[in-house]
Amino acid sequence: NTRVLTGITTSGTPHLGNYAGAIRPAVAASRRPGVESFYFLADYHALIKAQDPARVQRSTLEIAAAWLACGLDPDRVWFYRQSDIPEIPELTWLLTCVAGKGILNRAHAYKAAVDRNVAEHADPDAGVTAGLFMYPVLMAADILMFRANLVPVGRDQVQHIEMARDFAARFNHLYGEHFVLPEAAIDENVATLPGLDGRKMSKSYDNTIPLFAPKAELKKLIFSIVTDSRAPGESKDTEGSALFQLYQAFATPEQTAAFAQAFADGIGWGDAKQALLEVIDGEVAPLRERYQALIADPAAIEARLREGAAKARTIATPFMRELRHAVGLRDLG
Ligand code: ATP
């Protein structure tokens, strides 16, 4: 069996990028024979960027409901909240003790923060928490705990999977073969969606289109996407157009080809935005209805998550016992 693992950070409301980039492909993959899927709500990761407790809590509920609305079947897959598994931070420490600091120095997110400070002539580590620095180790623990062999990621995350492999290999070398070395899976058909401002759509940039925004709000947001000043009748570029990229993620190849032709023929931006609204709403509307029903019953979601945690710990607890023994810590019984 192939074990596939996907997490979403509970740092805000799930958005179209999370759906097209993670939820939709992961749910499709979970239905293939021979695939064992692990989905988790990355709430420890959220604390690195979201220090608003109400936001983290609300996001946890929303992302759990989003997974369920999009067709995740909790009886067939492993579905849990990261912070319900105390073995994950425990494993994080064991991995911290084999992780090379020099490797962590090169992690993109940390480096980007340092580079920004240097460019602004500030102290290189100003405002950088140890949490941001250590985040690849926590991510390695998420993956290695469940012996996931495939981790679908965007290109910017490949480095983190390589780090997880590196920590796992060092640990195995010191203590015996305990970890499976994971591989990154880059799906060429999964695009990175741009947000309202043209940058990557991301909860931390506040440039998102919420996955389950009511249609009126969806319309308002789509009509606020930044476009150039070309008038109707003037030919438009599909290249670099956020509008076009979003359309492509929700349309069939035929619809996309027709849309590209409409760009060349000078479709007006208003009409293009209306077409985008229809194609997104066509796919999302039935999911939105299920989501509304789910989110109205937080206690039922909480119960699902607790069941999921108990199931995930049937793997994590004995594995942690094995690892504690391997490194020379006492058996907790
Ligand atoms: P944050 O800003 O808190 O990191 P995020 O929304 O950018 O949040 P994550 O929660 O870390 O991202 O990502 C969860 C999953 O969604 C990952 O698999 C990631 O690749 C995918 N994803 C996130 N943003 C996009 C996007 N704009 N396009 C496609 N996939 C995305």
Image (tube, rainbow, N blue to C red):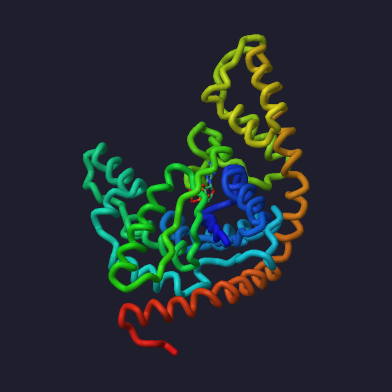
| Residue 56 sits above or below residue 87 on the image | above
> Residue 258: which quarter of the image?
top right
Left or right, 168 with reference to 29: left
Which sits in the foreground, 71 or 299? 71
> Residue 226: which quarter of the image?
top right
Give the quadrant of the C terminus: bottom left
Image spot of residue 213 (x, y percent): 68, 45
Image spot of residue 134 (x, y percent): 34, 59
Left or right, 157 with reference to 330: right
Image spot of residue 328 (x, y percent): 31, 82
Give the quadrant of the N terminus: bottom right
Identified at 64% across, 20% down, the residue is 260
**Outermost residue toward the top in this view:** 233
Which sits in the foreground, 152 or 178? 178
Which sits in the foreground, 114 or 167? 167
| Residue 96 sits above or below residue 212 on the image | below
Image spot of residue 106 (x, y percent): 29, 48
- Tally the marks: 0
Identified at 68% across, 58% down, the residue is 72
Identified at 41% across, 61% down, the residue is 140
